Image: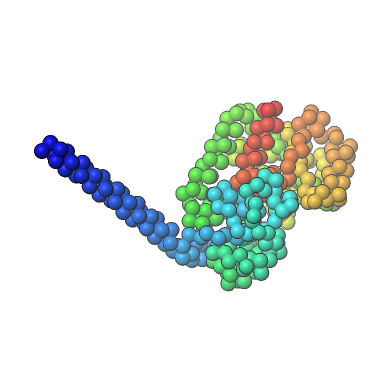
Amino acid sequence: MFKIKSLFTIITLFAVFLLAACGSSNDQAEGNKADDKKEEKSYTIEHAMGTTKLEKQPKRVVVLTNEGTEALLALGVKPVGAVQSWLGDPWYDHIKEDMDGVEVVGVENEVNLEKIAALKPDLIIGSKIRQEAVYDKLSAIAPTVFSETLRGDWKENFKLYAKALNLEEKGNDVIAQFDAHTEDLKAKLGDKVNQEVSVVRFMAGTTRIYYTDSFSGVIFDQLGFKRAEQQKELFTADNKLGNLAIEVGKEVIPKMDGDILFYFTYAPEGDKQALSTAKEWTNDPLWKNLDAVKKGNAYEVSDATWNTAGGVIAANKMLDDLEKIMLKK
């Protein structure tokens, strides 16, 4: 009798466990279905060219700006196609490992429509300032979302891209992490942020002073740095680049001074003319007479991460550079 009762108990327990397992599997299946439905829910994005409807969360994304590429990578999305980096072969050194296998679809100001179409994207991300002329053709290939411009405030574009990817919450986390990184550095720098900074860029036959609306300028502003006082008069209403930058001649070198001077050179593929421009200017007596230069407070930094890449990954790297330079790490 005891053996029969024991056997009955074992069978009963087994049945209970079996039912529980089935219930768990069913719950998981229902959960997966719910996730799939959530993922497939259509949504509409307002952007620089109007509105675009996406029927579901995109899986195959082509991105047509350098900063957009960084946005995707920061959001955990590897594009199927992207425009070539302005520096690198074909990608910036700081992203090339993450871009392995991504198809090059031209450069920002000359995209290859045939290559883009061949990739069969379900979302194209670009910029009005770069690709407005081919927006209709891109839209005929796949839903297309454009930012307005590519100047310093990359955060606004980043938020747009996160919405287009249906990853707004994750995007908010990425921005929050950057802001925390900025506040941490600001606290470490203490009174050092009260100094005046100057930013100079050398290119082939051209030299610019970069200002408040530039990529580095927006980051310096968030950190609390002041701009070189004597440069304000240069950025008048008729400056063709606004508060982004101004092209200058050597007679303006004295106005490049500041408590700290940062400079970088845009020399794709080792452009000899750009490198020659940088060498010529930094060997000029007026340059050598700058207080920042004489005091050892002039620093050469990366054009890619301080200006050209223009995205969130580069922004974090710029903060790392500033910490090393200003805290002598």
| Above or below, comparing residue 76 to residue 122 in the picture | above
Q: Nearer the viewer, residue 36 or 312?
A: 36
Residue 114 rendering spot, x and y as whole percentages: 66, 69
| Above or below, comparing residue 126 to residue 314 in the picture | below
Residue 57 rendering spot, x and y as whole percentages: 48, 59
Residue found at x 48% / y 66%: 53
Q: Quadrant of residue 184?
A: top right
| Above or below, comparing residue 70 to residue 299 in the picture | below
Q: Nearer the viewer, residue 214 or 67?
A: 67
**Quadrant where the image shows the N terminus:** top left
Residue found at x 53% / y 44%: 174
**Quadrant where the image shows the C terminus:** top right
Work out whether residue 36 can be spotted: yes
- Residue at the left extreme, as displayed: 1
Residue found at x 64% / y 51%: 99
Residue 79 as seen in the image, left or right of residue 46? right
Work out whether residue 49 can be spotted: no
Residue found at x 53% / y 40%: 177
Q: Nearer the viewer, residue 129 or 74?
A: 74
